[in-house]
Amino acid sequence: MYDLVDAATQRLQTADAVAASKWINGGPITDPVRAQQVLTAVAADAQSTGVPTDYVTALFTDQINATEAVQYSRFSGWKLDPAAAPETAPDLSASRAQIDELNRRMVGEIAEQWPALQSAECVALLDGSKTAVAAARGLDPLYRQALDAATRSYCNP
């Protein structure tokens, strides 16, 4: 389950670059059109792997919400301390390409981990993986909280 949690973490970590881009370019944090595109794509990927599409869309809804929460937190910090706000940001399309690749990887990992996700050991496996990934990636408290939110439905297929 480590690889699934690690991919989810990497996807969460795109939030800083996306927030910087939206801050500089004046884009909204919540983008319902983009969110629907993501959910449609992961549902199609899930269907091709045999994983229930409703389960995958629920997981990715949690993932999107957690990512947006990090972005809102960054915006709040920058409003309180404008000197800390980014002056440059990567192109949003580059971040979205990275997110799309991580989404595909996550759906593949969900399919591979499907037996574990349905098992009685799921919560323990998930908790162990989150702890290991958080340590390996050096997650701060905000990202650790976001990871908990992003993975909250993993053990409820």
Image (cartoon, grey):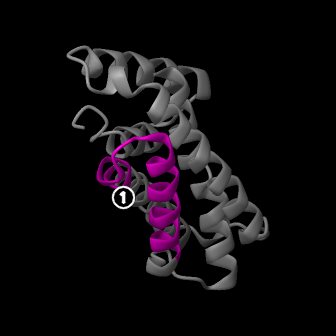
Camera-nearest residue between 26 and 62:
62
Q: Residue 104, percent across and down?
A: 60, 47
Q: In percent of the image, x 71 and y 66: which residue is there? A: 86
Reply above or below: 72 against 31. Answer: above
Who's the residue at 38% across and 15% down the image? 128
Q: Position of residue 107 (x, y in %)?
A: 51, 42
Picture coordinates of residue 75, whole percent (x, y): 51, 69
Q: Nearer the viewer, residue 137 or 103?
A: 103
Residue denoted by label 1: 61
Does residue 149 appear to the left or right of 76 in the view shown?
left
Q: Which residues are magenta?
A: 34-58
Residue 110 inside the magenta-drawn segment: no
Q: Is residue 151 left or right of residue 17?
A: left
| Quarter of the figure with residue 136 | top right
19 vs 110, left or right, is right
Instruction: Please tell me whether residue 43 is drawn above or below residue 149 in the rendered image.
Output: below
Numbered disc total: 1
Which residue reaches farthest bottom?
Answer: 26
Magenta stretch, main secondary structure class = helix
The residue lying at 46 percent from left, 33 percent from top is: 111
User: Is 44 in front, or is 6?
Assistant: 44
Pointer 1: residues within 10 angstroms few (<14), some, or many (20+)? some
